[in-house]
Image (tube, helix red, strand yellow):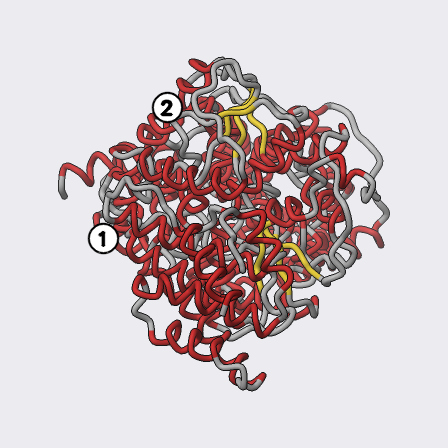
Amino acid sequence: MSEQFEQGVAELGKQIDAKISSYFSSCVHCGLCAEACLFYTETGDPRYTPIYKLEPMKKLWRQEHTIRGKLAKAFGLSKPLQEQDFADWEELVYDSCTMCGRCSMVCPVGNDITYMIAKEREGFSRAGYAPDGLKAATKRALEIGSPMGVTLKTLMATLVHVEKNTGLKIPVDQQGADYMTLFSSMEVVNFPEYIESIARIFDAAGVSWTISSKAFEATNSGIQIGNSENAAEIVSRVVTAAEELGVKYVISPECGHAYTSIRWDGPNLIGRPYAFKVVHILELLEQLKQEGSIKFSGKTDEPLTFHDPCQIVRRGGVVKPQRDLLNSVAANFVEMTDHGVMNWCCGGGGGVSSSERADALRFKAFDRKRKQIEETGVDTLVTACANCRMVLEDGIEENEMETTVIGLTELIADYLVTDAKEQSEVR
Amino acid sequence: MIAQLIEGPLWYFSLTLFVLGVLWRLFMILHAGVKKDLAVPRDGGRVGALRAIFSRFVPERTVRRHGRVQLIAGYMFHLGLFALLFLARPHVDFFAERITGFQWWSMPYWAFIVAAEVAFAGLIMLWLYRLLNPVTRMLSSADDYIGTVLVFLVMLSGCLALAQSVEALRLMHLLLAELLLIYFPFSNLMHAFTFAFSRGYTGATMGRKGIRA
Amino acid sequence: MSTINDDTEFRRALKKLDRDQLREIGAGFVQNVLHLNKDKRVARAVDVARNRDASDDELLAAYKAARVATVDSRTRCGADCNWEEQAAHFVARASSAMVAPEGMCKAADPPWQVVMSCRMAQNCALIAADDDSINDESGNQHHIMNDYLNS
């Protein structure tokens, strides 16, 4: 066995805390988690049962944390983890799990299986068993500051384009601004209209905001691949930049995983609380609306539905704002049957969409979302995550559906009241 | 001689091993520790933990239909077993004599029969489900089946002992119960105690995020 | 004589055009950046947009093909961004909005989506070339509009 593998096993062992130990102790193999997982429901393959993805970690747990396991190990009656175990499980751990958290919501004994997967990935990534796409993305995030290779120069070029289009200045490195916003590389590269939208909204609301030239990336590949050191480095750049600028809040953009990384994981990664608060863009927009700082004029009659990004709702705790905002600008908002906290994943989170190897399985898993969309009978799908948007569009094209996907922030920006002349049109 | 062994040293050994074993397993869990969550909570973790301990007794809405066999059979088995273990007259007498020193209400004979039938039916349904469902069949280990068989034998021997009122059957029942007590801390029967921890930890984490676990 | 040289007048002029005119002018915008995209589906969309006699079925077919071209050309999440390919993606996005039948492009302002996507395509091309020049695609579009209105 290689040294790297040994290091991976050692790391896996370090990840077994009281939570993990209680989870393995309580699991009675009822299989109910499978019914919550779209990789199982859409393929019927029992190997995609969430708790089954944890077998390597369970093997180690049994040997290190149970009486029977310790005795068996002492008497040479149990085999240690082998490299083949990691090799065999890599696809289960990374390709068939988006860390969406649905399994964690249904386990009768309360196992947070998503948490367990995140911990298991720490061992796998340390051992070198992670998808090439994720490894490369993490390397770029550490070396360049963005998993997609967006440099400050390329970001500024996009910002110039946005400024030209909006006639607004995008503040950079503004000391003492109230808010520092982050972007996901996906937004910069594929959906620059998101940046345009928030520039217009913040201008209308009179929000004091800025971007940091030292840390503008919202996503955290370290979390997705499962490497706490890398994840901590990535978060600390944001924290340092925000604290240097003296901002009160850091805004996490629409991206789901970016939010859970900075809001819930970040302080624990760097080992201390922040000197600022973290707010999701949707929370801020709803707050601005409640305060009356932004107003809307008119509503779209287009029947539309909403895809809840998992990391925002179930893993993030942001459920109401998106609905309030959507109802402000849409007259015919139709909820999917399983929505909000029990939405179904798009199938591409947790690094799955970055791995070409996982494409075939991802498209199969998309069947769940396809059925949800078809059940609503509407052709317009709104969402609030750049990765979900891309994954949804991929799935829609793959299935030759007529559905169009639009971003929530862009949608509400289209109905924004922006000057005194339009005030009279406000409903 | 065998009877004396079963009634005496083996009883004390199995009970001691059960108590110490369970405590040791719980200690091993807690000793692994949980890091303090430094993220600013949206809501209370303690409330979330308590809530989850009880809310997870009811299956989540979206999987309720799929899990209905296990739900029904599971409650039949667990509630039936609970009634047999703590409210059957012979057990109440046994506990009073050997552990607590006091008695409590015990159910009438007909209720005992009903509880036993319900518990048996539930256990057999659960066992069949485990064998026939591809997911549970794949997940299940020897531990799951040994636990099932042991509990079944304890229940069966208990019913036979009561029905026949033959001393040998009573001793067989006690012996099997002692074997179950010995096996317990080494198995995933530990879920009977650890479920509160697993639900509590998750409930606390989700509670801090403002999500009802 | 049209002498548009800023976006305010440009937008105003766009709003005065009918659907057929918007498709034609859109084709002009996309044609100007078409060299950034080699996908035949995008070139076909431009041809269909230019054809005033194009049937609804032809427009729908061109739109669907352009939409697929848009999705196919996008950089996947977490992948190393190739700005040349991104330029091609935005050209495809523009072409899709350009031929979208009524109600199928969900952008609030489909003609403006064509305009913006073309500008973004040029932006990406400049990034790819590591060229610090100012992106003047907006100026090009003003000229195209002037030529169209004055013809």
Above or below — where is B73 with respect to A192? below
Residue tagged 1 = A84
Q: Amino acid at mark 2?
A: Arg
Which of the marked residues, 2 or 1, is nearer the chain's N terminus? 1
Q: Residue at x 63, y 65 (%)?
A: A373
CB-based contact (under 8 Å), mark 2 and mark 1: no
Foreground of the two, B197 or A3: A3
The x, y position of residue B207, in whole percent, is 65, 31
Establish if A248 lies above or below C8. Answer: above
Q: Which residue is mark 2?
A: A237
Q: Is residue B137 visible?
A: no
Please report, as a chain letter, where disc 1 is located. A
Q: Nearer the viewer, residue A86 or C108?
A: C108
Give the farthest residue toward the front.
C1
Q: Position of residue C79 (x, y in %)?
A: 31, 50
The quadrant of the image that shows the N terminus of chain A is top left
Residue A129 appearing in the image = yes
